[in-house]
Amino acid sequence: MTRGILQTTRLYHVVTQWSGTNNNLWSTEEPRRFLSEEEILRNPLDIDLKTVTDPLLSRLYLHRQTTFSLNDPIQVRIETFDSYGIRRTSGGDFFRLWMEEPGLRANVSGDVIDHNNGSYTGILRASWAGTPTIFCYVEKRKEEIALIYRKYHQYDTLWNAHADFFNGVAVESTLCFTRPMPPAEYCNLTADNGDLPYYCVHPLHPDLNCSMVVSVWSYRRRIPLSPAEKLVYDLSLDKEKDIFRQNISVNISRGPENQSSLSSTTPCKAVSPSDTWRNEAPSGFFYKDAWIPRLCAMTVPITETAYSACLKNRSLWISGDSTSMQIMTEMNNVLRVVPAVTRTHEPKIIRHPHYNYSIHWNAHEFPYFPGLLHYPKAYIKPESHHFDKIPNDSRDIIVLYLNTHFILVHPDVFRRHVRKLVSRTRALTQRAPNVVIAVRGPHAYFKQMYQEMYSYWGLVFRDILHEEFRPLYDRVIFLDFWDMSVALGLPDFHPSPAIVRTMTQSMMGYICRG
């Protein structure tokens, strides 16, 4: 079980004790960005809501000085208090910590370490010269996360997934899950899901059987909640009450060579895959509205010529979900191959006859929630379904992505799917050594309209990806968009077109190699 222990060198230095009084506040355990499920669930559900974290009474402190040099780590202390003014003695809350300077159109994310005693360490990087301000708010409290964990166990999926059975005359739609949910009788569709768990309730009609699934669909249901659970569920509904009253202004001086911001001259395509997994936090920052990665320089311009040269005589596979479809749309906006890319969930292919390239999108395997339109079941395919189509001498590019739809099921389901994907990826790299493979990590979003869609799970998923892909670090590129999205505080799991453009250019910078 993932415990949130930092698997990479994301944090350059971790304070284990504060100078002065209350040195005993800090735990000596390994630094963690989130708590285990067991730790989250220790508190009872029936609680006094005035005992949860109250950001209006909680405190944000700067660790030491207020003046820094370019590239210095900046450490802040977060102490949480409840609405009675009593200091919290357990962790588990999920924060957004960031630093910004509107005059320079600059933003950078911060990492938060959970000491599981009511205190947290926030770490940022002095990324540009100026006078930025540090802000913090609570995105989700421990009690909200515990509630969703309980709902995973109670209902398996937070949204309803359906399968349609049809024999030419009779038709029936039933619910689907990642595990059998007694006492119903189930159809086991695992073999059609890349050998990953997929169970749909057996139809009641006597003339319908498990071989007659023709289509799938879904809808967002309201999670059944007791009155006490509803109060917990709505804890973060009032966004204004989640912002810390304090913010911290700092001064950052220019670098030794009079630099105004951090930068690298190494092209991203020259960075080894293993270095993309070990990158320190933050992975980059925004400066004058441009994304500046710390590890390398984005040398692939957003032009039809540059993108076509990268893709010439190759196929780009970007299967996943609707956010992967957004990347395909941005690619087409630059390449201008077809008039438009539809936002529906059928398989898509863009082909350019002159440059002999193609771009492919498919929905990944179940759990996938395509919405109210009924799609042929064959449209939902394993993320690695195309691996067998790739020749041994191929130079194709594959960008793997599992994230958003897995937020609607328990994180153990995500791990199971990633583990299968790693096995398939290892076999492909051994057979086709010239294929370029990347994994796109989760991106963060905050205060968005679907209350049950917690960006928090991206922290868990990032650790799972690092743990499971560890044997392939030297072969698979990690595309890290977490810090980019935390810096901006995206309001939706579908990033804006401008952010998708930045993500796509960053992706192209890494994968346009060989």
Image (spheres, rainbow, N blue to C red):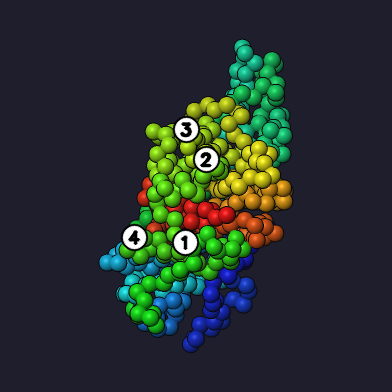
The residue that disc 4 covers is 289
User: Is disc 1 placed on a helix, strand or loop?
Assistant: helix
The three-letter code of the residue at mark 1 reads: Asp
The three-letter code of the residue at mark 2 reads: Tyr
Circles 1, 2 touching at the beta carbon (< 8 Å): no
Q: Residue at 48% across / 52% down in the picture?
A: 508
Q: Residue at 42% across / 48% down in the picture?
A: 305
Camera-side residue of 410 and 426: 426
The three-letter code of the residue at mark 4 reads: Asp
Identify the disc placed on residue 344. 3
Per the model, the C-alpha gap separating discs 3 and 1 is 29 Å
The residue that disc 2 covers is 357
- Earlier sequence position, callout 4 versus callout 2: 4
Q: Nearer the viewer, mark 2 or mark 3?
A: 2
Per the model, the C-alpha gap separating discs 1 and 2 is 31 Å
Per the model, the C-alpha gap separating discs 2 and 3 is 23 Å
Q: Residue furthest top?
A: 169
Image quadrant occupied by the C terminus: bottom right
- Earlier sequence position, callout 4 versus callout 1: 4
Circles 3, 1 touching at the beta carbon (< 8 Å): no
The three-letter code of the residue at mark 3 reads: Thr
